[in-house]
């Protein structure tokens, strides 16, 4: 039995996995085209071209780009008329922008527990959280796994709730053949540096409602209207515009995305099968109705029932020492962040989220872009840690 690297043994892998982002001369040529055009801001034609192409790929009629995926959420809420006095259902297991966007428009985030298998909102818990003040729900397609959109849309219709899909993890993801971002009033996408489609920063709203598209575009573009003059402003807006530079990068990265999704799916399927043969970690499960998972994150759970003597920090550190690019994930639910000590919110019972934060961690999508023979190293690293459980348990990381 090999000694763990964190205890002085040799690491299983010393070379890095795939680089992210991936780029070549194509990106340089696209950037040079914008440079030579002299139109560097949000009115370069590449912006509109990307908006239309991405929206149509996501089964939506309209795409409205913005500076990032946080302001797209804020814009969607404002465009839907959400504000003070409204309650919005959000998950507590996600990036903080899902909840703070609600607060920034004056509404109240209501934290509702997640499903232990998909890490998406538990609609049974959401049903219990509805009050006369509830106006909307923001489902996060966490890690790239779509929420059950049939059940969600039925639930929203029953309670007359606006649906704003947080698709920051889910570029290309689909439920029963239909892309996420096309079900609700809006889909909100992020192109931040870690995402599977990136320009460093950026965001985009998808919608099938022409009125909502126009309202969102106006908010993002200083209150202007599409048919209005430059110095005509019809409502309170700001400058959230995406630039020509970002659109150029996004167009080139978008062309790579379908093949990358296929590679990630194949490597994820391999990992799920192989890790199921071990019992240290619980690999992710995929609903049979998911016709495309973007695999932004590959979520793993420490099997505490089998190994109660271990904790997540020790396993994460052990894998990292073996050369695996693991991320410890969220240390606690969103509502435990200090910001909410002074920001109005409501917390419903979230025992699953509390448990998942103690057990779940992940590897990000770039490891799934490597050749199959490289993915084997991750399985070998998990097996090595499993073989050394007793030694690991004697020196737990807190």
Image: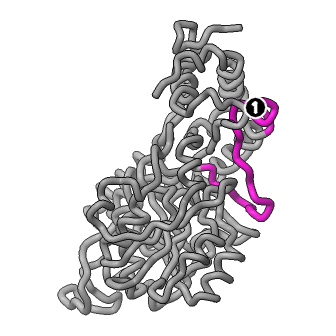
Residue 88 pos. (x, y %): 45, 76
**In the shown orientation, is residue 49 left or right of residue 201?**
right
Give neighbour class at mark 1: few <14, some 14-19, many 20+ (Cα, 10 Å). Answer: some
Residue 257 pos. (x, y %): 59, 53
The residue singled out by tag 1 in the image is 279
Q: Is-magenta flag for residue 16?
A: no
Q: Residue at x 45, y 60 (%)?
A: 190
Instruction: Please count the marks in the image.
Output: 1
Q: Residue at x 31, y 54 (%)?
A: 338
**In the shown orientation, is residue 229 left or right of residue 147?**
left
Depth check, front residue: 362 or 262: 362
Q: Residue at x 71, y 27 (%)?
A: 379
**Residue 150 visible in the current orientation:** yes
Q: Residue at x 38, y 64 (%)?
A: 70
Q: Is residue 228 above or below residue 276?
A: below
**In the shown orientation, is residue 282 left or right of residue 361?**
right
Q: Is-magenta flag for residue 275?
A: yes
Q: Secondary structure at mark 1?
A: loop
**Residue 23 visible in the current orientation:** no
Depth check, front residue: 312 or 349: 349
Depth check, front residue: 192 or 247: 192
Magenta-highlighted residues: 273-295
Q: Is residue 157 above or below residue 313?
A: below
Depth check, front residue: 167 or 316: 316
Prevailing SS of the magenta stretch? loop
């Amino acid at each position: 039995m090999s000694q763990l690297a964190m205890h002085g043994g040799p690491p299983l892998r010393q070379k890095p996995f795939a680089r992210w982002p991936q780029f070549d001369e194509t990106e340089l040529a696209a950037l040079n085209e914008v440079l030579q055009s002299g139109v560097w801001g949000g009115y370069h034609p590449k912006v509109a071209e990307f908006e239309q192409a991405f929206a149509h790929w996501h089964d939506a009629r309209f795409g409205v780009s913005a500076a990032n995926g946080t302001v797209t959420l804020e814009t969607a809420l404002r465009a839907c008329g959400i504000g003070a006095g409204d309650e919005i259902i959000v998950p507590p297991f996600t990036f903080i922008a899902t909840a703070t966007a609600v607060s920034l428009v004056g509404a109240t985030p209501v934290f509702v527990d997640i499903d232990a298998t998909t890490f998406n909102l538990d609609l049974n818990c959401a049903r219990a959280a509805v009050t006369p003040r509830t106006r909307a729900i923001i489902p996060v397609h966490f890690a790239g796994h779509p929420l059950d959109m049939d059940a969600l849309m039925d639930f929203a219709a029953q309670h007359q709730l606006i649906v704003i899909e947080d698709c920051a993890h889910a570029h290309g993801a689909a439920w029963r053949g239909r892309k996420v971002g096309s079900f609700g009033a809006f889909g909100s996408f992020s192109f931040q540096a870690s995402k599977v489609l990136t320009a460093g920063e950026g965001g985009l709203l998808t919608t099938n409602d022409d009125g909502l598209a126009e309202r969102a575009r106006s908010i993002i573009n200083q209150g202007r209207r599409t048919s209005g003059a430059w110095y005509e402003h019809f409502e309170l807006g700001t400058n959230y515009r995406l630039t020509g530079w970002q659109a150029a990068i996004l167009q080139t990265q978008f062309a790579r995305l379908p093949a990358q999704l296929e590679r990630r799916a194949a490597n994820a399927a391999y990992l799920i099968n192989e890790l199921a043969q071990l019992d240290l970690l619980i690999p992710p499960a995929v609903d049979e109705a998911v016709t495309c998972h973007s695999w932004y994150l590959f979520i793993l759970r420490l099997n505490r029932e089998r190994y109660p003597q271990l904790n997540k920090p020790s396993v994460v550190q052990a894998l990292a020492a073996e050369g695996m690019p693991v991320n410890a994930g969220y240390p606690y639910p969103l509502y435990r962040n200090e910001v909410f000590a002074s920001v109005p919110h409501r917390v419903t019972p979230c025992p699953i989220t509390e448990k998942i934060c103690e057990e779940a961690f992940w590897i990000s999508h770039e490891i799934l872009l490597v050749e199959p023979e490289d993915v084997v190293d991750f399985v070998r690293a998990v097996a090595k840690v499993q073989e050394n459980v007793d030694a690991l348990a004697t020196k737990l990381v807190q």
